Amino acid sequence: MKFKLRVWRQPNADAAGRFVEYELDGVSADESFLEMLDLLNERLLQRGEEPVAFDHDCREGICGMCGMMINGIAHGPKAAITTCQLHMRTFKDGETLEIEPWRAAAFPVVKDLIVDRSALDRIIQAGGYISVSTGSAPDANAIPVPKKVADTAMDAAACIGCGACVAACPNSSAMLFTAAKASHLNSLPQGQAERYDRAVLMIQAQDAEGFGGCTNIGECEAVCPKSISIEFIAQLNRDVLKGSLIGAGQR
C-alpha cells in the first residue's frame, strides 16, 4: 500500500509548527498505524532526516499513550480502539492521511505529535484516595458490593486517560475523563467517605488546568477507545452540586 502523509512537525513547545508531506509506499495492510509511523521514521533516518516524534508504550490499547488525530478524528476512524490498534487495512491504498497532535490549551505540544498530558494526572491527584481502612485483601473482599455497583465502578475504571475526549471536544473539556476517574471510586462503598470532597476538588482542579466546560455535545463518548459513557458526567454533576451545597472541598 502507498500513502501520502501530512504530518504535524514542531521542534519544541516554543517553535512554530507546520504540516510536512511525505510519500510512503511498501506499507502492509496488516501493519498497525504505529508500525506505519515506524516505517516512515526508518525511511527518514536512512535519508538523514529527523524522525517524527510520537508517544507510545504498550501498543496493546492499554496505556493510552498513542493518542493522535488522524484525519480530524481522535485515534482514527474506527470506534472503541486506540491508535496502536488501528490497522492500515482500514484505509484505502493511495489515501492521504493527516496526522496531528491533540489540540487543547491544557495539552501543550512537546514535539511533533507528543503533548504534555500531565494536567490529567493533577486532576487525579486532587481527588485524593480512599481512606477507609479495609485491611488486607480478604478483609476488603468482606465488604459487600452489589454486582450492579461493581460493574459501574469497573466501567468507569476502564478509562485509560488518553485524552481523546479532550481532543475531540469543541470546548476541550475533560469532563468525561474527570467523571470516569471520580465515579470509579465514588460508586463503591469504600469511596463514600470522600465522595463529595473528591467530586468538588477534581472539578476545581480541572478548571484550574484550563480545560473548557462541558456542553453535552457527546463527541467525547464517540471517540473514547474504552466507550466510557457520558452518564458518568451526569453523576459527577450531581455529586458536585450536592457537594457544593454541603460545603465539600474546603480543605
Image: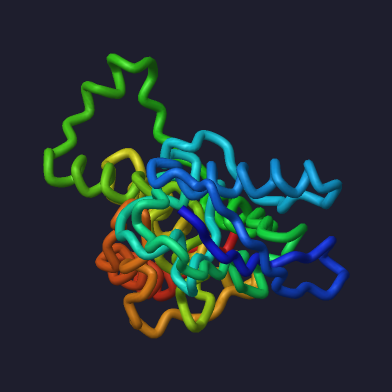
State the image coordinates of residue 75 (x, y, percent, origin top left): 45, 59
Q: Residue at x 34, y 17 (%)?
A: 137
Q: Residue at x 71, y 46 (%)?
A: 43
Coloring scheme used: rainbow
Q: Residue at x 54, y 79 (%)?
A: 212
Residue 126: quadrant of the picture: bottom right
Q: Nearer the viewer, residue 152 or 194?
A: 152
Q: Residue at x 83, y 75 (%)?
A: 16
Furthest-left residue in this view: 147
Using the rendered image of the protein, determine whether residue 153 is visible from the camera's viewpoint: yes
Using the rendered image of the protein, determine whether residue 201 is visible from the camera's viewpoint: no
Residue 155 horizontal side relative to residue 181, left or right: left
Total of numbered circles in the picture?
Answer: 0
Position of residue 73 relative to residue 38, above or below, is below
Position of residue 134 relative to residue 244, above or below, is above
State the image coordinates of residue 227 (x, y, percent, origin top left): 29, 57
State the image coordinates of residue 93 (x, y, percent, origin top left): 41, 61
State the image coordinates of residue 216 (x, y, percent, origin top left): 34, 81
Q: Nearer the viewer, residue 137 or 48?
A: 48
Q: Nearer the viewer, residue 161 or 249?
A: 161
Residue 175: quadrant of the picture: bottom left
Image quarter (top left, top right, bottom left or bottom right) of the C terminus: bottom right
Residue 225 horizontal side relative to residue 115, left or right: left
